[in-house]
Image: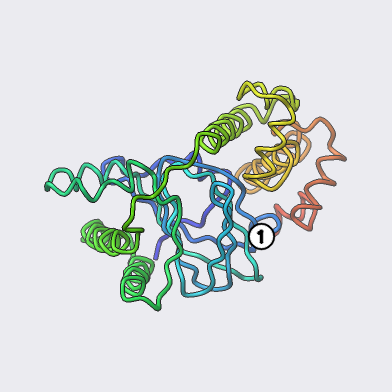
Amino acid sequence: MNKITSDPPMLEELTHLDHRFPVTEFVDHFDTFADGTFPSHWHPEFELHYVISGAVEYLINGVTYVVEKGAAMYIAPESIHLARQLTAGTVSYNVVLLPQFLITLLTSIQCEEFTLPLTTRQPEALVIYPLSKEGYKIIDRLKIMYSTENTQETYKLLMLEKLIGIWRFLFSLFPKETVALPDNKILIRNKRMKEMLDYIHKNYAQPITIQDIAGAANISKSECFRCFSELSQMTPVEYLNDYRLLKASKLLTTTEKNIADICYEVGFNSTSYFSKRFRSQYKMSPKDYRMKKRGS
């Protein structure tokens, strides 16, 4: 299939291989994620997830959704979201698409009325079940996309054909009544969280305090804790340390740097504390993790 095995630290830094066709596919093996969880993040793309096996709990802008094997999930652009497996061995197929690509295409053929969910980012999420006619057709197209090699000569045409079909059926499933936009408090909360996540992702290698994180959004420490509790279900320090560990896991498998250097490079100031936290998250030492991932 030649799909990318997803890497939590890299998704929010996603660069599509072809900027003219900004569609990227991932296969999420949740057993490889620390605690079976893909951490809170956001990006301008919208996402489609098809759960191949197991079950996934999504937290999207503070709202929880459960998607079981055979069902799928739509996540609107710029939504703050995380995903965690509810059963061991969960695997999902994930398509990430820059909305402007679809907006430009639909507008060029005078179908701009179908772009509204992308420009308003409403609804924020939708669980897609195979029991409805539209849901079945969406999931059938996702299965075809999943099984198609991206080396095929007509790969882009197939992807475009299936994505247009998916959007047609998704549009039919979206609420027909005008969806109420989130109130101002929720919009402000989400904006603050994005600013704090961006700050952590850019500065994780440096010493960071709660005040620094809160200051990135110009809010109090108590409001900072409230945002992280609602949108990531952890404290800011827990998120920071988990993100550092994700970066460390990447360096362990992609570089020859020694463990002490990796520890300091990702922002920890104690090798013993780093090893303790790493073992707690990944159920093995950094050395064993490196050996396992390299198959030695």
Is 45 placed left or right of 39 in the picture?
Answer: left
Out of 164 and 133, give the one closest to the viewer: 133
Out of 118 and 140, give the one closest to the viewer: 118
Name which quarter of the figure residue 126 lies in. Answer: bottom left
Q: Quadrant of the C terminus?
A: bottom right
Q: Say which element carries label 1.
A: helix
Figure check: 139 above or below 273: below
The x, y position of residue 95, in whole percent, is 40, 56
The x, y position of residue 1, in whole percent, is 39, 66
Which kind of residue does numbered mark 1 sit on?
Gly
The x, y position of residue 237, in whole percent, is 75, 36
The x, y position of residue 69, in whole percent, is 52, 74
Figure check: 49 above or below 52: above
Q: Which residue is mark 1?
A: 36
Q: How is the image coloured?
A: rainbow
Q: Residue at x 16, y 49 (%)?
A: 111
Out of 153 and 59, give the one closest to the viewer: 59
Q: Residues within 10 Å of mark 1 (few under 14, many from 20)?
A: many
Q: Residue at x 57, y 57 (%)?
A: 58
Out of 147 and 56, give the one closest to the viewer: 56
Name which quarter of the figure residue 164 lies in. Answer: bottom left
